[in-house]
Amino acid sequence: MKVVKVLFSALILLSINQSGYSQAKVDTLLLKLYQEPRDSIRVLILKDIAYEYEVNEQNPILAENYLLEAKRLAENLKNDKLKIEVYTSLGVLYRNISNYTNALKFHNDALELAKSISDKHYQCVSLNNLGVVYRRLDNHAYASEYHIKALKLAEEIKDTFNIAVACNSLGNIFSLNGRYDEALEYFQRALFLSKKMENLLGQAMNYNNIGEVYEFKGDYEKAKEYYSKSLDVNFKINSLKGIGINYNALGKIELYLGNVAKAYNYFKKSLEIDKQLGDKKFLADSYINLAKAQLFLNYNNQALSNIDSCLKIAKQINSLIHFQQAYEVLSTYYQRIGNHGKALEYFKLASAYKDSVLNEKNSRHISTIQTLYETEKKENEIKLLLQQQELKQREITKQKIQTYALLIGLLLSGFMLVAIYFTLKVKRKTADQLAEQIKEIELKNVLLEEKNQEIEEQKIEIEKNKNFIEQKNKNLEEAYKIIENYIEKITDSIRYAERIQESIQPSLSQIKSAFPDTFVLNRPKDIVSGDFYWMQKLGKKVFFALADCTGHGVPGAFMSIIGIDIINQAINQHHLFKTDDILSFIDQELVRRLSRSKVEKVLKDSMDIALCVFDSETYLLEYTSALIPIFLQHNSTIEELKPDFITLGTRLTNINKKNFTVKTKKLIPGDWIFISSDGYFDQLGGENHKKFMRSRFKENLMLVSDLDGEGKCSHLEKTLLDWMNNTEQIDDILVWGIKV
């Protein structure tokens, strides 16, 4: 640690000395600018002065002024290459000060100019620059599209530097989207090219990026190894920006490993560097990381101040990822101080920003671009193979001509031998030799013909494959558009069905007219739900029920609508007020309605339900429950009221009637009633990917025994989300809490 402190101090002193050296260099460049008569050279000198002010003097305002003067001169000269260089420098400057609108404008202008003069190198540079800006704007779909275009073009012209830049950026995009193996492939390729070019800055960046992938994968020792390699290279090249990034990265690893004090020191050093450099993106990184460490150290006021600084910068540069990180830290803070409502509010905000950065449509877009890139690469390989086959064909033709020439030469030699040698022995010997050679030549001709035929067949097969690939890509694109359109229409219809379903269930205000302190935690699996709740007040008695219908999504929603209709019919039309009579009526009606005819078997659809009647004067609770348990909380104790093990809507073999039990329970003011479908208990999650279970549900009810309805609901929902983590929801979830 002492060595790192000494190196850090030395680097700060070096930057001060460098500043003095840089000012002297600026003075020299200004003198050259004054003496130079040619405007084309003056443009280049102005660019160099702007670079010194931006990078070494950290004065972006002066840098911008000199670049705008360079732009004016280049445009007056009508020199396209000079204009491209100036536009590119302006784009990079605006990107570094987080003015992304101007950055995109100048990089696009540079790209259009490069296309107009067919300069592929400058096109690669501009495409990569546009990709970097969109990555900073958290638009990964656009970023990947520009970097893939840059990669293809750079590979075509063998532009090693821009290949490395594109691979590095694509690695970052795949890493942020959780596709770590693909990210590592891109980073390893970029690192190899950086080493080949002896580009130390590129090596430092890729060591850091590989470390980040291992961090995301949870391999903290491997991540620390690569972050340290990057830090060594950044010290070697005196890169303050790179050192600041490495300190932030190493600080996060120490935080994960529980070394909070070490993490805190790393984040403080990083913030000092980022304040000196003024790059808002990295400033926001340092503020939020420092806040995380300060919360662990109970420096709560300092942490809140740094979170506020991060949010201000996020608003300035419209950084979705920093909004997400800031809200996650605020959720943790409020959870620690026991304000569960605020904790859940910020947790949901963070999740919303996370979804907007890493949404499924972006992911599909990135995958599509990657697939098209791989397909085009394959097509180029096929073209190369066809060219090689053509060269082989020419070589075979050449060999054939040589063979015929050899044959003619041999025949002429035979005639000459016949003419020279008259003896029979010599004639026979010569004839035998010629016959042997002719057979050999004929055999070669046959082999050559077979090889030629084989090549022709390969060409036909390659052409078929090429047409197949083109048609397949076209079909895939058309299918993708059709599917997206259908998904959008179906989702809109289900959203409308959701509003209908909500309208037929009692609103929270209606429930509170009977029970002032209450909550409903309702999380359908697929927008609409097979779980429903119902309530009706008749005089001093309140009838209420919670049911779980077979299935979820649209089929479950239809079942829930049928269930609500039957309950209303039982009470309002048939005047049934005993809970067992109501359940018997629901059971019979479900069997009748869900049977195709009198002789056909009942469908497999069924319903579990708990139906209660509460007398607001006597505080007597009457209930009948089919497979749904009821939990009662008195002070800090939890009692589970067991249900009848019968389900509604199915016909029991050899039994004409189901026996439903009416039970009663005397309550006192302040007691709580909880009813829940099995979706909460059966949800998979936790470290071992197991069910949540009723026992854990009851433990959590005890934990929140002193909270009001809103607090209980917030705690139960936050506990469920933490348990699920990234696990998919497997069923509809409905929990209803009522204070009597």
Image (cartoon, helix red, strand yellow):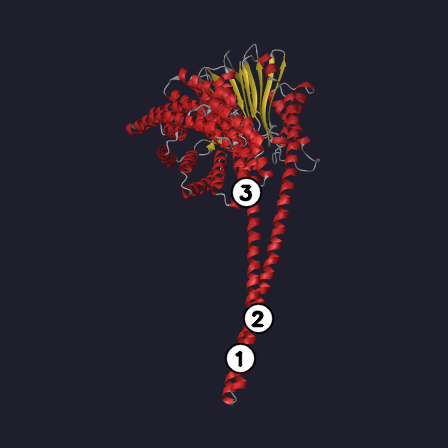
> How far across and how far down the image is residue 263, in percent?
36, 26
Dot 3 lies on which element?
Answer: helix
Mark nearer the viewer, 1 or 3? 1
Front-lying residue, 661 or 553: 553
Counting every numbered tag in the picture gives 3
The amino acid beneath tag 2 is: Val
At 64% from the left edge and 38% from the top edge, which residue is drawn? 481
Q: Would you identify the image quadrant in which residue 647 lies? A: top right
Say what secondary structure mark 2 lies in. Answer: helix
Which callout, 3 or 2, points to the residue nearer the camera?
3
10 Å crowding of disc 2: few (<14), some (14-19), many (20+): few
Residue at the spot of label 3: 153
Decide if residue 599 is in sight here.
Answer: yes
Residue 158 in percent (x, y) is at 50, 45
CA gap, disc 2 and disc 1 = 24 Å
Question: Is 251 on the left-hand or right-hand side of 723?
Answer: left
Image location of residue 312, percent across then percent down = 49, 19
Residue under numbered circle 2: 446
Mark 1, secondary structure of its residue: helix
Residue type at numbered disc 1: Ser
- The crowd level at tag 3 (other Cα within 10 Å; few <14, some 14-19, many 20+) is some
Closer to the chain start, of discs 2 and 1, is 1
Q: Tell me what residue is drawn at x 56 percent, y 79 percent.
A: 412
Q: Position of residue 112 (x, y in %)?
A: 59, 35
Identity of the residue drawn at 56% across and 18% down: 622
Of all residues, the one furthest to the bottom in this rendering is 423
For residue 413, which numbered disc appears in the image? 1
